[in-house]
């Protein structure tokens, strides 16, 4: 485990299952976890060209600038990379010879029209199954970590698994014994554990859309809270290295033993929307302090309750920039001195913290 492991402890949280709690007293702005993805795959359907205005590297998902800084896969015309380094890394990992061949076969498969008749989401799930099979071939222990995560198939997933397995299993190398059941297990893990990587912020741009999905083996254990005390950052588009690590940073001080939670989506959403997303996508009803209060509100009552502590929290921590609504967390403390600058986890906006006047 990484160096941050002394900061976090896995515990059973009543009513929630496993969760991560502070293993010591922690400070606002502190980074409690930095972690590479187990698996990272494109959110664009196999057949449809992406609707995104950006072109992404198929390995790190950083933006690819135009020719001559584009490095296509030598064997297929469908995948390109941002640098010689990403191309070389990809050919030995995420875009191995097997992945390249499997994706070409799916596109040219006599039954490929079948895949196109399903919702585009199915094509993205096909990418995930290919990526997880590649993990199985290349890094069996990481594949087993993926399988150990939370999530069990329901009847919808079993249907999808049957369909995708019939298309993909003929492409598996002879030594692999990938069953329908395993495919269903994997799809269930993906549904509950994947994080979205978003198109970069643009003030006038289209609605934020998802460019890739990633599963982080430890970050996935952070439970949800509608008033979280931590949030995620990533630096895929801002660092020269196109870093794909997730960084979890504290929004406020967290005492020893208290659970650390993130919000699974933008915090500004209203109670009914949150309730719907959490039930449909994650299968639970949130009983956080904010939900307990807002569950009893009548229509529009929120507007009359602007002085509640949790409304003040939202004013302070939801980015006000146009088309953003990201989460503002303090910069990491320097030499144990807390920062009074808040940074947005989506647009990168920095603002002085005028709220906590000493
Ligand atoms: Zn790249
Ligand atoms: Zn290729
Ligand atoms: Zn809640
Ligand atoms: Zn922002």
Image (cartoon, helix red, strand yellow):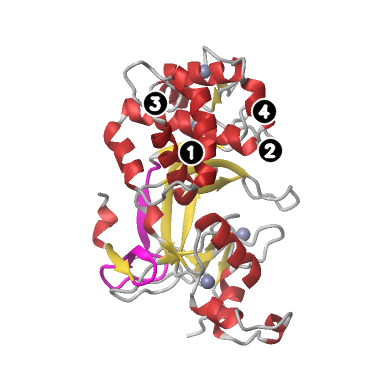
Residue at the disc numbered 4: 116
Q: Is residue 104 above or below residue 257?
A: above
Q: Residue furthest top?
A: 75
What is the CA distance from the residue labelled 4 to the residue labelled 3? 27 Å
Q: Which residue is mark 2?
A: 52
Please identify, in this view, whether the residue under mark 4 or under mark 1 is nearer the observer. Answer: 4
Mark 2 or mark 1: name the one nearer the start of the chain: 2
Q: Which type of secondary structure does the marked residue at label 1 adopt?
A: loop
**Span colored in magenta:** 14-37
Ligand 4: quadrant of the figure = bottom right
> In the image, 153: left or right of 312?
left
The answer to which of marks 2 and 3 sits earlier in the sequence is 2
Q: Which numbered circle lies on residue 183?
A: none
Sequence-wise first label, 3 or 1: 3
Q: Is residue 238 visible?
A: no
Q: Nearer the viewer, residue 163 or 358?
A: 163
Q: Mark 4 against mark 3, which lies toward the viewer?
A: 4
Foreground residue among 139 and 243:
139
Confirm if mark 1 falls within 8 A of ligand 1: yes
Residue corresponding to mark 3: 93
Disc 4 vs disc 3: Cβ atoms closer than 8 Å?
no
105 vs 261, left or right, is right
Q: Are marks 2 and 1 in contact (CB under 8 Å)?
A: no
């Amino acid at each position: 485990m990484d160096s941050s492991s002394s900061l976090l402890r896995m515990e059973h949280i009543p009513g929630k299952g496993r969760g991560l709690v502070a293993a010591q007293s922690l400070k606002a702005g502190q980074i409690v976890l930095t972690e590479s993805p187990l698996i990272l795959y494109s959110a664009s359907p196999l057949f449809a060209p992406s609707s995104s205005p950006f072109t992404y590297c198929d390995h790190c998902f950083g933006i690819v600038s135009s020719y001559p800084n584009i490095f296509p896969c030598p064997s297929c015309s469908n995948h390109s990379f941002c640098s010689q380094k990403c191309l070389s890394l990809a050919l030995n990992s995420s875009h191995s010879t097997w992945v390249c061949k499997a994706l070409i076969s799916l596109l040219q498969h006599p039954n490929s029209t079948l895949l196109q008749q399903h919702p585009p989401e199915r094509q993205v799930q096909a990418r995930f199954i290919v990526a997880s099979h590649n993990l199985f071939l290349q890094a069996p222990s990481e594949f087993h970590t993926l399988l150990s995560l939370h999530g069990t198939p329901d009847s919808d997933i079993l249907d999808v698994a049957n369909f995708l397995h019939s298309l993909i299993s003929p492409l598996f190398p002879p030594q692999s014994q990938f069953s329908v059941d395993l495919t269903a297990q994997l799809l269930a893990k993906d549904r509950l554990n994947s994080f979205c990587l978003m198109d970069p912020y643009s003030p006038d741009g289209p609605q934020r859309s998802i460019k890739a999905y990633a599963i982080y083996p430890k970050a996935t254990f952070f439970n949800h809270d509608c008033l979280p005390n931590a949030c995620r950052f990533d630096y895929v588009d801002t660092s020269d290295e196109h870093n794909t690590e997730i960084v979890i940073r504290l929004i406020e001080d967290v005492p020893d033993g208290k659970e650390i939670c993130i919000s699974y989506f933008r915090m500004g959403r209203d109670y009914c929307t949150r309730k719907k997303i959490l039930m449909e996508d994650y299968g639970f009803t949130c009983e956080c302090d904010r939900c307990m209060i807002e569950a009893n509100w009548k229509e529009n009552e929120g507007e009359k309750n602007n002085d509640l502590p949790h409304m003040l929290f939202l004013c302070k921590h939801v980015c006000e920039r146009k088309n953003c609504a990201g989460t503002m967390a303090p910069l990491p403390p320097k030499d144990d001195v807390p920062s009074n600058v808040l940074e947005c986890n989506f647009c990168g906006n920095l603002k002085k913290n005028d709220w906590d006047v000493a």
